[in-house]
Image (cartoon, rainbow, N blue to C red):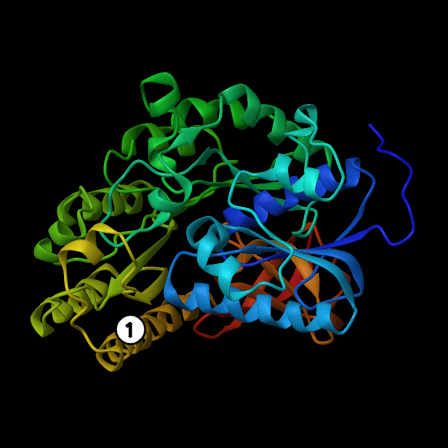
Amino acid sequence: MTGPEKQPGSLVQVVTLGCSKNLVDSEHLSRQLQAAGFDTVHTDAPVKSRYALINTCGFIHDAKQESVNTILEFIAARRAGHIEKLYVIGCLSQRYKEELQEELPEVDGFFGVNEHPRILKALGGEYREELEGERVPATPSHYAYLKISEGCSRQCAFCAIPLIRGRQRSLSVEKILQEAGYLAEKGVKELILIAQDLTSYGKDLYGKKMLPHLLEKLVCIPGLKWIRLQYTYPAGFPVEEIISLMKEHRKICRYLDIPVQHSHPDILKRMNRGHSLEEAVMIIKRFREEFPEVSVRSTLITGFPGESRAEFLHLKKFVEEMRFDRLGVFTYSHEEHTPAWRNYTDDISLRTKNYRMQSLMKLQEEISLEKNRLKAGKTVEVLIDGKNDRYYYGRTEYDSPEVDNEVLIPVDSGNAHPGRFYRVEIRNAGPYELYGQLTGK
C-alpha cells in the first residue's frame, strides 16, 4: 500500500538506543512513517532532516546517560537549524517524561513506549493497523529480530522493565507467523526470537507456555534457515521440549541464551529470580549432553546490594566451572522504584563493582580464547554479515549479532556476499573472533 505523495523536506531521522527490542519498535515505526508519506533514515549521528525521533533506553544508569547525551547532541543540531523538530520516544521518555519536559524544553514532544499512533498524529500522519506486521529493517536484510511479547510479569528485584513496559503481553501465534512470513519474503534467513522473558511466551494469552508450539510453526516457513532463541529465562524453561525440537529441526540454532545473573543462593534469593542455581545448571548440562557443540551464553550482575567478597568469589568460581561460551557481565545499577531500590542500600562502591566486573570478564576472556583455539583447523558454516577494507565478517550458528563472536575472512581469500552462507576453514583465533579462509558455499 502506498502513502500520500511525498513532499520536499519530508525526511524523518530515527535513532535507536538500547536493546534489540527497541530496534524492532523503531523498524515498525519507520514502516508507519513511510506509509504516511515520509522518507526515513535510521542513523545515529544527526543529519539534516525535518524531524528527528530518538528512541531511548531507560533500563540502567549507563543507558540512561547515553540517551541524555544523545538528546543533547540533537538539541544542538536543532539549534543549528539542521533539524526542524525533535521528538524523544521510548523507555526513558516513558519513565521520566515530566522530568525531561522540565529539563529539556527544546524537545518538541515526549512519547513513551507503544505510542506509535500518537507519534504519527504529532507528525501529521495516520497510524494504520493493517501495517502492524510490516517493518523497515535497520539490520542487514538477511537477519531480523522478532519480538514475540512485550513487557514482563516477573519481579526481579533489580529490574525496571515491568515499571516501564508493564506486565507481559504476548502476541498471538497468528500475528507472529504473519510477521515472520513477511520477513522471510523480504529475504530474511535468520530469525532471532526476543522478548523480556521468552520462556513464558503465551502464558498470559493462552493460559500456558507456548514457545515450543510457536517454534513448531516457525520452522515451516520457507526461506528461513536459522531460528535463534534469545533471553530464555531459567525458571520454568521447557528443557525437554526445546531439546526435542532442536533434534528434529536443524533450523533451530544450537544456541542457548540463559541469563543466570548470579550463582550464590543468597544473592539469587535477594534478586527474587525465582530459580535456584541448580535449576540453571541442570538446563545447561542437559543441552551440553545432547548437543556437545552447543553455544551457551549467559549474563551476570555483580555488585548487587550486600554482595560480600565471599559471594563474589562464589560467582567467580561458578564462571570457572561453567566455562560459558559467551558471557556478558554488568555492574548493578540502583534503579528508582524497583524492589531492590525500596528494600536495599546500594552499598557496594562503584570502584568495587567495576573491579569485580573486570575480574570476571578477564577470566571469561581466557576461557573464550581457549575455546576458540580449539576450533582451529575445523570447517564451519558462516553467514556473511558484511565487509570492510580488510575482512568479510560473519557468524556461525553459535553466535548472535552484536553480542557474540565474529568470523573474519580476508577479502583477498575469495568473493563472498552478505546474506549468503559459506564454508570457512578456521585458521586462527582471538578471544572474541575467529579467522578463516573461504572453502566454498
Q: Is residue 417 left or right of residue 70?
A: right
Tag 1: amino acid:
Met
Query: Quick check: can you spot residue 399?
Result: no
Residue 419: percent from left, percent from top? 70, 50
Residue 302: percent from left, percent from top? 23, 67
Count of number-bearing discs: 1
Q: Is residue 207 left or right of residue 424?
A: left
**Camera-side residue of 37 and 319:** 37
Residue 266: percent from left, percent from top? 8, 56
Q: Is residue 417 left or right of residue 251?
A: right
**Above/below status of 298 relative to 166:** below
Q: Which residue is mark 1?
A: 357
**Camera-side residue of 183 and 127:** 127
**Above/below status of 285 relative to 67:** above
Query: Quick check: can you spot residue 384?
Result: yes
**Camera-side residue of 238 and 21:** 21
